[in-house]
Image (cartoon, rainbow, N blue to C red):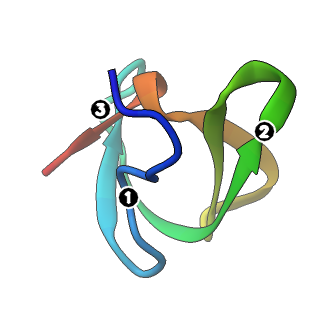
């Protein structure tokens, strides 16, 4: 598993696994105590997703 390297970049379009919806990454942030990145997407700015909830297009 990747350590401190985010999988997705700002502006990248990805799919939300659960819904299949295409969204755009707005911001990523490393969550140190969980040892993984969280992502905010443009379409849902008040919600964050972890890498395993998203897939590359």
In the depicted structure, whether residue 17 falls above or below residue 41: above
State which mark lies toward you, 3 or 1: 1
State which mark lies toward you, 1 or 2: 2
Badge 1 element: loop
Q: Residue at x 46, y 25 (%)?
A: 53
Q: Residue at x 40, y 70 (%)?
A: 9
**Residue positioned most to the bottom:** 11
State which mark lies toward you, 3 or 2: 2
In the depicted structure, whether residue 34 falls above or below residue 21: above
Separation of residues labelled 3 and 2 (CA atoms): 25 Å
- Decide: few, some or many residues near mark 3? Use Cα within 10 Å; few <14, some 14-19, many ≥20: few
CB under 8 Å between callouts 1 and 2? no
Name the residue carrying label 2: 31
Badge 2 element: strand
Name the residue carrying label 1: 8
Relative image position of residue 30 (x, y in whole percent): 71, 48
Name the residue carrying label 3: 20
Q: Residue at x 42, y 81 (%)?
A: 11
Q: Is 50 left or right of 10, judged from the image as shown?
A: right
Answer with mark 1 or mark 2, whichever residue precedes in sequence.
1
């Amino acid at each position: 598993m990747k350590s401190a390297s985010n999988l997705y970049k700002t502006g990248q379009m990805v799919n939300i696994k659960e819904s299949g919806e295409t969204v755009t990454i707005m911001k990523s942030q490393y969550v140190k105590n969980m040892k993984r990145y969280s992502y905010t997407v443009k379409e849902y700015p008040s919600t964050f997703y972890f890498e395993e909830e998203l897939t590359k297009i």
